Amino acid sequence: MSLFLKLLFRNRLAGFGAVVLGVIVLLALLTPILPLHPPNETNTANRYLRPLSDGHLLGTDHLGRDLLSRLLWGTRLSLAVGFAAALIAGLAGAAIGVIAGYFGGRTDNVTMRGIDMLMAFPYILLALAIVAVLGPGLLNALIAVAVVNIPFFARNIRGVTVGIAHREFIDAARLAGMGHTRILLTEVVPNIVPVVVIAMSTTIGWMILETAGLSFLGLGSQPPQADLGSMLGEARSALITAPHTSIVPGVMILLIVMSVNLLGDGIRDALDPRLRSGALARPMAATRVERREVPAAQGEGFLRIDALETQFQVGRRIYKAVNKVSLDLQPGECLGLIGESGSGKSVTALSVMGLVASPPGVITGGAVRLEGKDLIGAPYELLRSLRGRKVAYIFQDPLSTLHPLYRIGDQLIEAIRVHEPVSHGEAHKRAVKLLEDVRIPNAAARVRAYPHELSGGMRQRVGIAMALANDPDIIIADEPTTALDVTVQAQILALLDELRQRRGLAILFITHDFGVVGQLCDRVAVMYGGRIVETGPTQDVLEGPAHPYTKRLIACVPELGGGRRILAAIPGLPPAVDQLPEGCAFAPRCDKAQDACRRGEIELKGETRKVRCLYPEVAP
Ligand code: ADP
Ligand code: MG
C-alpha cells in the first residue's frame, strides 16, 4: 500500500489531481454542516447578484438563490451520481466480462453479441433513449449512464479474462478439483481487479460529464434540486448578462473531471505491473557514477579495469555486485572471466561501457581505462562513439537481443551506419560480407531472414557479426554459448578463436564453464561474490588451482576419457551480495576454512598468478 502511494505521488500531476479531488470531496462531504444558505431558498429581490456581494460569496442565480450553496450541494450530487454510475457499470461490466471470457464458447458469443448491439448506438443517444423510456429524474439518469458504460467494461474485462483463462495456474486449479465458482473467485477475479480499478478510475470523469449532460438537457435532476449539469442548464438563458452563473458550475465540472483523470492516470501507472517495477523511470543512457577518487593505473594494458565497484541501490539495500575488481586485457588476448551465476560477471562487463541500468545501478569506484583514457564518468557522447566501434558486446541470448520484427540484414546495416556514414548499398554489401565471415551459408539470401527463421547457432553467429560490424578492438562476450548445445558451442568457439587471430581482437570471455575457458582463453580470472579470487594463465590455473573455489569449479567439469568419477557439486549457495560475510566470501562453503578466513580483508596476492586465499591449495 505504501509502495502504491509512493508510486502514485511520484507522478506529480497525479498527486496534484489527488489533492484537488480530495479538497472537492471533502467540501462535498462537509456541505451539510457548513454555514450556508439553504440551496433552494429563493429571493427574487436579490437576482443575479455578482460574486463577492454581501452574504453571497459567489453571487446568486435567476431566482436569487445562493450560488455557493447550490454549487456545493450540486457537486455533492454530481460526485455521488458519477461514482455510483462508475461502480455499477464497473461491477456489472466486469461480471459479464469475466463470465463470458472464462466460459467462452456459446456463453461468450451470446453475451458479447448483446454487448456489441449496445455498443452499436452512440453513447449519448442510447442514454437519451433509456431516460425517455424510464422518464426524467436523477436516478434514471444514473441508470442510463451506468448501462451505456457497461459494454466498455465488459469488453475490456472479457479480453483480460480470456488471456488468463487458459493459463497454467487455472488448469492446475481445475485439475486440483476446484469448481468453476471457486476458480472464478479465487484465481480469476484477483487478477482482474487492478484492470477494473484502472478502467473505473479513468472513466469516472467521463461518467460525471455524461450525467451533467443529461441534467443540462433537463433529463437528470429535477428542479429545485440542482446538480452541476442542471445548474449549467438553468444558467444558459443568462449566459451573456450574468456569466458567473454558468462559469461557477462550469469551472467546478472542469476541476472535477481534470483531477479525476489525472488521478486515474496516476493510479493506472502505479497499478500496472509492467510500469510498477520502475519502468516509468527509464534507465539513463549511461550508468550513474558516484566516485570519490580515481585509483591510479596499476600497470599497462589496452583495456584496464582498476578496483571497479558497481552497486545496485534498491531502497535501503545495497548489492555490491562488483567489488574492487581489477582486470587487464592486452591486444589480441583472450581473458576468461569465470564464476557461478550471480557472481557479478555480467555487471563487470556492462560497467566497462557504462551499460548497467541506472537506477538501480551505480558505479561507486574504480576506473576503466581504454588506451589509458578513463571511461568511468566520461561524457555520454564519447561512450556512444566507443560502444560498438571500439568495444562490442555479444550477449547470451541472441533471440532477445535481435529485434524480432526487422530482417537481420537491416539490423546489421543499422549497426554499421550508426558509426560510419556509408550508403545503404555499401552497408548492405558489408552486411553480406560479415555474415560470410561468421560462416553463415548462403549469406546473400540470409540477410533477408528474420531472427525467428534462424536456428540458435545461426542467430548467435548473427550476434557475432553484429559485434564485428564496426571492426572493434575488443569484444566482450557474455556467455555467448550458454544457450547453445555443445556441438554448436564448439563451432562458435572455433569461430571466435579464428576471428581473434585473423583480426587481432582482444576478447573478454565470460562463462561459467571451465571447459570453454580451457579451449579459448590465454588467461583466466575467477570471480566469486563480486570479487576476483584467483587469476593466472589458463594452463597453470587448470593444472594447479590455488583457490579452493577454483579447485571445486574445475572438479565440476566432466572429462572425456577421464574414466568414471562422481562429478562433485559445490555444497551450499553463492552468497547474497547485499550481506556479504566478513573475510572470505567462500569460507562458509569451504572445507578448509579456518577462523582467520572469517576475519578482516583478505588480499589478492601474487605476481602473474594471484590468489585471494590464506591457505591456498598450491603456493601461487
Ligand atoms: P552473473 O555472474 O551471473 O553474470 P550478474 O553480474 O548478472 O551475475 O549479477 C551479479 C549480482 O548483481 C547478482 O548477485 C544480483 O544479485 C545482483 N544484481 C544484478 N542486477 C540487479 C538489479 N537490477 N538489482 C539488484 N541486484 C542486481
Ligand atoms: Mg550473467
Image (cartoon, rainbow, N blue to C red):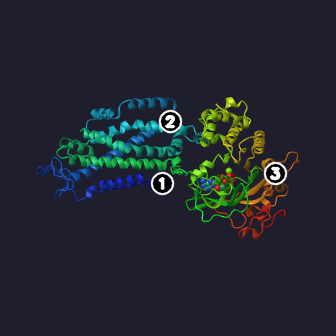
Q: Circle 2 is placed at which residue position? A: 101
- Most foreground residue, 567 or 190: 567
Amino acid under label 1? Leu
Ligand 1 has an atom within 8 Å of the beta carbon of the residue at disc 2: no
Q: 616 or 176, which is in the foreground?
A: 616
Q: x, y (%) of residue 376?
A: 62, 57
Q: Of the two numbered discs 1 and 3 on the same chain, state the one appearing first in sequence.
A: 1
Residue identified by numbered label 1: 7
* Residue 40 placement, left or right of 263: left
Foreground: disc 1 or disc 2: 1
Label 3 Cα neighbours within 10 Å, binned few <14 / some 14-19 / many ≥20: few
Total label count? Answer: 3
* Left or right relative to 284: residue 478: right
Q: Which residue is at the front of the view, 466 or 83?
A: 466
In front: label 2 or label 3: 3
Q: Amino acid at mark 3?
A: Leu
Measure the alpha-carbon separation of dots 2 and 3. Answer: 51 Å
On screen, residue 195 above or below 452? below
Q: Say the numbered circle drawn on residue 567.
A: 3
Of callouts 1 and 2, which one flags the residue occurring earlier in the amino acid sequence? 1
> Under 8 Å from ligand 1: the CB of mark 3?
no
Report whether 530 appears left or right of 557: left
Query: Please, what secondary structure does the residue beneath circle 2 have?
Result: helix
Percent of width and height locating residue 480:
71, 45
Mark 1 and 2 residues: CB-CB less than 8 Å, in contact?
no
